Image (tube, rainbow, N blue to C red):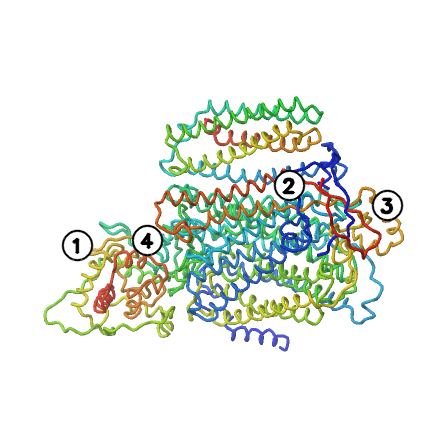
Amino acid sequence: MADAIAKPSLLTKDEPAQPKALVLYRPTAKTGLISWLTTVDHKRIGFLYGISALFFFLVGGLEALFIRIQLFRPNNTFLTAQQYNEMFTMHATTMIFLAIMPLSAAFFNFIMPLQIGARDVAFPRLNAFSYWVFLAGAIILNVGWFMKDGAPNGGWFGYTPLTTSTYIPGHSIDLWVMGLQLLGVASIAASLNFIVTIINLRAPGMTMMRLPVFTWMTLVTAFLIVLAFPAITIALVELMMDRLFGTNFFEVSNGGMPTLWIHLFWVFGHPEVYILILPGMGIISEILPTFARKPLFGYPIVVFSGACIGFLGFGVWSHHMFTTGLGTVATAAFAVTTMAIAVPTGVKIFNWIGTIWGGHLRMRTPMMFALGFIWLFMIGGFSGIMHAAAPADAEQHNSYFVVAHFHYVLIGGSLFALLAGIHYWFPLMFGRKVSEFWGKLSFWTIFVGFNVTFFPMHFLGLDGMPRRTFTYDPNMGWNDGNRVATIGAFILGIGVAIYFIVMIITYFKGEKTALDPWDARTLEWGIPTPCPEYNFRVTPTVHARDNWWYEKHHQEQIAKENAEHEKAESEHGIHMPFQSIYPFVAAVGILISGLSIGAIDPNIGFFSGAAAPHDVIGRKLGIVLIGFVIFLIGVYLWALEGNEGYHLHLDGDHGHDHDDHHHHS
Amino acid sequence: MSTHAHAAAIDPHDDPTTTTGIPNKKLIMWTFLASDCMFFGCLISTHLIYRLHPAPGALVAKNVFSIELTSFSTFILLMSSLMMALAVDAIQKGNLKSMRGALATTIFFGLIFLGCQVYEFSHFVSEKHMTITNSMLGTTFFTLTGTHGLHVLIGVIWLTSMLIYSYTGRLTEKNAIDVEMMGLYWHFVDIVWIVIFTAVYLLEYVS
Amino acid sequence: MRLLALPMFAASWLDRLGFGMDGRQTTMVVDGPVAEAQRQLFFVTCWVTLVIFILVASALAYATIKFKARSEEDEHAEPPEQSHGNPLVEVGLIGASVLALVIIAVPTLRYIWWDYDVPVERKGEAYEVTATGYQWWFQFQYPTEQIAGSGPLITANELVIPAGRPIHVNLRSVDVMHSFWVPKLAGKVDMIPNRGNFLWLQADHPGYFWGQCAEYCGDSHALMRFRVIALSPRDFEQWLDNQKSPAREVPVTAGQARAQFASLPLEYKEFPQNAPGVSDEFDVSPFDHWKEKQFPNKDEDAELISKGRQLFVAKTCAGCHTIRQADGKGPMGVTGPNLTHVGARTTIAGGLLENTPEQMRRWIHNPGVVKPGNKMWALGYVPNHITLEPSDEVALVAYLQSLK
């Protein structure tokens, strides 16, 4: 990422610079490891999210291939029962929390502030903290692969009482519980930041009804995260207390009710589905107008339906529980709300078709993925409506029909949109673009592989094959469907491999692009690549919904306006936040605490030797406290160093780079 | 941008650096409180669900609680909210001295509340034989009220550091927004307690 | 005719690929009113969504093809009209979607009430059983069939019901969550600890049905299977009589031929890991096999059986299993499946293995390999240091096989 074209200048504080403690001097590195550990630049943080997400996407994909190899033929012995259960638990947890969500977060971070004409998010250090805590959670979730007790194997839904220590003792579930709690903290902190940013840091003239749809969906998603994650966090806290301190929340013999967990989980779990898909819908709503070369059809109704999905998303959770004996009234109510939520979802599809209708479609790779998204998401949506018919769902629930359904929504939907987004914004981020041939080849391989994998699963489900089963007998009629699905999974895997290899090659050697290679419509395309640290030389003034398109067609007016604003702004310069190491330090403290609560067995490793039970607890508590103290120090110094920054004064000369010498206030 | 915040005191009702005029810190606190509502909502639901579906032989809450003590501490917490409001008002008017007085009283009341809770917990454990592990009531009660107590504790620490910084010069009338943000948190913690007091204690005495 | 050729060709291919959906647990070929209602509703949803899909997908395909840029010139042509939408179209489409959903909603609501419990007018003829989930097997209780001195009739893993009558199944769990699912008879309902769920189902005809746990319940969830056998009312009564009677005993009489237990050699033949537990021969006519199973085996070796009976106690099997004897004594364990008439079942090990001497020996030879994590292994064999000599295994199998 680009270094600022900066002429450093003094301060922000009025009072004269005072000598201060060493720990309060702010890091200034712009390259190298320290610069990444201390960055508060939303684009760099977005990049970190993106790289981590893609890494975990490959891990989750590998787990999926292992699952498919095991099911390739009946009574296969590739994996043991426990390994298989670890695989499907971690495949789901990884794909949801460590791949799709952070990949969305990468775009939230990188693109959203640019789309609203902001120079950063509202709380840059909190943003860095969110990423580092996310990484800590991701490490804790996956560390089980290297431990004696193995990876978490209670399913991503973690239904009690299976996940209580009676049925799965050992650390695997502790790790899962700790990891997910941290991911919750990270997601909530990041979302608070995005909400404030979108509401408060919009450029002049950027009214709410001029926000790009992707930004709108970011806002809705952020609200969903803020309101939905507490439910699972509390459920996890309760489960953790049961496991570690012997409380009774889910202790059946003391009156604990598994249904409480199921409700808490799905009160989170269903909004989570929309947390996964709404950003994708936002991306699609950016790509289609760009490549159709006309505005989004029915913008207000697309935005409204997005918000509507967000609201209704909190009222449909029990459709995951149709088979738990809810009773007739509750089942009927949730069946009806579930059907109702199909309407705003359908509206979006109509509007996307309306967008390409009458357009001049340029079939570039991002557009291919976007159109693929509509097709596959439509199929996933329709099988979703089938599940809303509760009595029919009694047969489909927990069968491969459901597996087919949500992969159509999550791969065909979310993932296709995110892959489209990577292609779409790649030129903006890295100044290069993927060759059309290789891009389309990866698209078609992924598209074909995906359908070959998941379409047969509809039939498997209707033929009575239950999910989460590590083996099946040859006489059940599931052999061919599974064989086809596994072959499809490998085609899909090859497609993803092509996608990644092409992406990496393009990063180094791809065709260089000029400003705005797609003739796009929204503000982010107005800034050069690599994107300067301060984003916009002049804070843009927004005149229209597709403001960059407007600027391109009203160049004189904009040039005049910018010149005026630049003059006004150059007096005080561009305000930039200082970098900080303390978000990272605080997250390291959290990682140590979390790992020791979840994993470190004082009887192994460097604490070898037999220890009495209370010694074990004492030692564990010791490490937890060490982590906690590091966390407190991080947070305290973070608060103490303050949210200071410096001012940049830009040269007229674009090509000229200055060294950064920061004068601390 | 938020980083402008410290350059000058921010009018709590109109911050020119933000689109809406609402200071960023105020907005993030409101949003956080919305999230915290859901946290407490889930804990309170857990408590009520298990209260409505007690296992055979479960503890009877009425025999454990001592409503007089809790009413007293509830009243004290309410009064601390009043003092907090006075503190915010004082600093918004630039009156640092009277803010210090109000903050100190808020902290004092917060500590009384925490003291009552510590006494209540130890009384329940030693006299009423209700622990966090021996009964569902103990599990949900201690977790819920303990989480609330933790919120009060964090608030007290936060208020105390503000009080100290008001003497060292780090906290001046320019930081009215910081005090106001803290005030929002404190009022929220107070309101949540009123809900908990009603749902956990008072409902036991209905009929 | 030519119009039909394509779909028929497609269907034949789907069939050839094994998507004919006529498997053992298919939801498409059913044998009871509950599953039939659910199947009908599925088709309603299927047709409605299919019609919408065809309409929307055609519009999408048409727009994609029609408005695609075809040449360099197209690509750089002036952008089209920058239109922002059409409220009338929007509202019309929303109205149409709502209407389509109503078509699904009406039968959905009707069936939600209908398949919840046995219809009022048929309550009188309903038969009640209680199914309980264990890690990883099912216990079935018949609360209306009381046996003097030992409570209700209890069996395991094979639920025998009268055909043509509504069955009210109470669903319970003693450990984690399970789910009771016999796809051909009814959709699933979960078995949740501390919660009294139930469902109803009916088999229209006598037959043999496959079922499986449908809620992830730990290591061997995939191996938690069961069967439902529907019998004509007369056969059912006869079956009940037999089940209510105490365990069958084979008296050792002097001078009896000491035939080696017919099909089981002393030497143990290893099975490959996860090898299928059901033979093709069984698979052709499972119901007939079930009927055969009700009769005593030929060539029974009374002495071997007697030795097996002693071993059953000596090897601590009796700690977990009940084998109800005429004298009211004998094994009374309740942690594992009731084995009083285990020889008359077609499957063992939670519906996993066919109930043949070889498979039964495979099961008791090393249960931990057959069903990872199961309690017989983890809480029985391992802590009690149980070792079985080949001759012990043969005797135990002979004994258990004799329990008709």
Which is more foreground, mark 3 or mark 2? 2
* Amino acid of disc 3: Lys
Please report, as a chain letter, where disc 3 is located: A
Disc 3 packing (10 Å; few <14; some 14–19; many ≥20): few
Nearest to the observer: residue A447 or residue A503: A503
Please report, as a chain letter, where disc 1 is located: C
Please report, as a chain letter, where disc 2 is located: A
Marks 1 and 4: CB-CB under 8 Å?
A: no
- Residue C25 falls in image quadrant: bottom left
Q: Which residue is mark 2?
A: A24
Please report, as a chain letter, where disc 4 is located: C
* Amino acid of disc 1: Asp
* Amino acid of disc 4: Gln
Q: Which residue is mark 1?
A: C327
Which is more foreground, mark 3 or mark 4? 3
Q: Residue at x 76, y 44 (%)?
A: A647
Q: Which residue is mark 3?
A: A567
Q: Which of pointers 1 and 4 lies earlier in the amino acid sequence?
A: 4
Q: Position of residue B58 (x, y in %)?
A: 38, 35
Q: Secondary structure at mark 2?
A: helix
Q: Which residue is mark 4?
A: C141
Cα separation between marks 1 and 4? 22 Å
Q: Secondary structure at mark 4?
A: strand
Cα separation between marks 3 and 2? 34 Å
Q: Position of residue C111 (x, y in %)?
A: 51, 53
Left or right? Give the position of A355 relative to A465.
Answer: right
